[in-house]
Image (tube, rainbow, N blue to C red):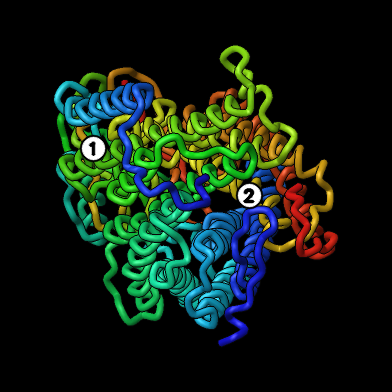
Amino acid sequence: MASELVFRTCPITGKKVYAVTQNLIWINAVTAVVFILVGGIMAFLVGMTRWPAVHLLPADLFYRFLTAHGLNMLIFWIIFFEIAGLYFGSSVLLNSRLAAPKVAWLAYILMLVGAVLVDIMVFTGKADVMFSSYVPLQADPKYYLGIILFAVGALIGCGIFFGTLAIAKAEKTYEGSVPLVTFGLAAAAIIAVFTLACGAIIYIPTFLWSLGLITNLDPGVYRLIFWGMGHSSQQINVTAMVSIWYLLGALTVGAKPVNEKICRSAFFLYILFINLASEHHLLTDPTLSPYHKMVNTSYFMYLAVLASMIHALAIPMMVEVAQRKKGFTKGLFEWLTKAPWGEPGFPAMIFSLFIFGFIGGITGVVYGTEQLSIKSHNTWAMTGHFHATVVGGTTLAFMGLTYYVIPLIFRRELIGKKLAVVQPYIFGIGIILIALGMGGAGTLGSPRRHWDITFAQSVIPFSFDPAVIFFTTIAAIGVLTAVTGGAMYVGVSVLSVFFGRKMAANEAKLL
Amino acid sequence: MPITSPEKYWWKPADKEEKIWISIALLWCLVLTIMMPLMHLIGTQNPSVNPMKIRPQDYRTVSEAFIEKYKVGEEQGIPVVEPPDGADVYLRAQMWTWTPILKLKKGVNYKFHISSVDLMHGFSLMPLVMNFQVVPGHDNILNMTPTSAGTFHIICNEFCGIGHHTMVGKIIVS
């Protein structure tokens, strides 16, 4: 028990960092980076195959690696990082010991075993089913088992987070309300519980079906509940990402929320409405009635959009106020031009906000309308949309945060600070090119999850407008740029974590 | 700071700027919300309004009967079908063909029944870029009126196995 109570005091923030929490954050974050490395290699191979000028992989490997890309990025990288974030947001920010550290390790092991099992199944060709694994396309039962193990592990991780909140409250480790970042992460964790419950509801019968114990699994029902997990897991990302924007605002310019009530109410709107919008995946399906679709994708979705609009004001506003207080008051924009653009966290936050809001958010709202979904459903434009939200938004925010977690939590000095500074720019520009290229080609009809957009092997010949090839080339240039940025991220973070100079206990240097 | 507890009383009224922004955003959300049902009344391009279930084997039977009844030829092994005006049209998705090739008339309304007999497929009408999900066991019923003549292609945009990228169909409108 005593070892669970060992802590140090952070010389920068004054927070208590418990050794067990630190180790758990470390293992989850490092594992996340390993998965982004796997997913990044897949991104390069898949991106270079989509580009007709290179057309790198054969068809079977393309579909296999595309499946691996989706799972390693969307699920493993992001959720491992989020679990690290939840432990940080509860134990560190609230100065509290972590609830049941041994169970937290069990959660980690379950997630790891699940993820490795899924990857083995995918890479050995036993699960060429894509991220969505639509029934009746069938994978090896061990694939579904891997997903279930991972989801159970992540659910336990959320439980540790809630348990820590309860302990912190009972032991009075903080006064008044929880910090805004913790509040946002709590919203993310609540959404995660709903998400993982949907995952259990659909993956357990699917697992039994793959074993032959259930014979009748309706593909329409599968789609409905799958997206209760598939899209909602992106809503966890949105909520965690917005929390991290607030955190990065504090770390880079010392920003403070202008109105806590507004920020917290917006998070509350996410909890209530964001998951109900996942039915927009089914707008062109023959399963739901128009009334159902209208209700779910109109006011339910727009109240979640409203929450994002509120954060879109609150975050730049708090940065502006903080900067103006520092004396950058000349003209309308001195606060922005004199911002710490040479520090990785600031450009990462601004790029993340811009790409998420202006590219990902706007395309999301447009494609989420019932009639415009007809124009975009399953096209590459959809792929462009979620690369803007999940990669340009969430991943970039997580990357920016990593450069602060390494000195703050792992107490290592960054190796390659100059690389870390330019990395968000390179990655951000790459993602913008990817999103615009995919959006352009997709608007002209280029399908997602497609090995050969020249249709060379089809019986009935068909070819696209040449502009599709042009936009695909833009996306491919984006892939090369973003993969370079991603490699820089992995390089800097891995080198720093393992070989960075160990910082002295009282060393108060951030970057 | 967002990483420390806020002051004791943080439930404070919003500033004027914040109120203006939130009001505009809310108004815009309401406009979008109203547009969604309104487009069902004034718009001409809407998703399926009466979803029906049909077992894949039953769908295969009806679509085979449809092909047999109105078949006018064959192209590279795929039947070419010319249904009469206003008929129910069955377009079957299966790994990795769209059956049959359809010959339709401009300005005539057809009731399309699109379904699959194996996996999930994606109906994508080119070059118009109109996309619908094709789900086995469910009949995607769409009223369609061709408004221009020419050759249209249907590509599959939902992953359906190793031959997914070869799945192309055709509709000829005269």
| A340 with respect to A88 (left or right) | right
In the displayed orientation, state which residue is furthest to the bottom.
A1
Residue type pointed to by label 2: Leu
Residue shown at 68%/51% (left/top)?
Answer: A404
Residue shown at 76%/47% (left/top)?
Answer: A511
Q: Looking at the picture, how far across and down is residue B152, in whole percent? A: 40, 28
**Helix or strand or loop: what does disc 1 sit on?**
helix
Disc 2 to disc 1, how far (Cα)? Answer: 33 Å
Q: Looking at the picture, how far across and down is residue A35, in whole percent? A: 64, 61
Q: Can you say which quadrant of the picture contains the N terminus of chain A? A: bottom right
In the rendered image, is residue B92 in sight? Answer: no
Q: How many marks?
A: 2
Could you say which is closer to the camera, residue A399 or residue B52? A399
| B7 with respect to A218 (left or right) | right
Could you say which is closer to the camera, residue A72 or residue B88? A72
Q: Looking at the picture, how far across and down is residue A73, in whole percent? A: 58, 55
Disc 1 residue crowd, few under 14, some 14–19, many 20+, Cα 10 Å: many
- In this rendering, the answer to whether A498 lies above or below B111 is below
Residue where numbered disc 2 is placed? A401
Could you say which is closer to the camera, residue A511 or residue A395? A511
Could you say which is closer to the camera, residue A429 or residue A107? A107
Q: Looking at the picture, how far across and down is residue A490, in whole percent? A: 74, 54
In the rendering, which numbered label is found on residue B104?
Answer: none
- In this rendering, the answer to whether A429 lies above or below A448 is above
- Write down the quadrant of residue A392 in the picture: top right
Q: Earlier in the sequence, mark 2 or mark 1?
A: 1
Residue shown at 37%/57% (left/top)?
Answer: A191
**Helix or strand or loop: what does disc 2 sit on?**
helix
In the rendering, which numbered label is found on residue A299?
Answer: 1
Chain letter, disc 1 residue: A
Residue type pointed to by label 1: Tyr
Chain letter, disc 2 residue: A
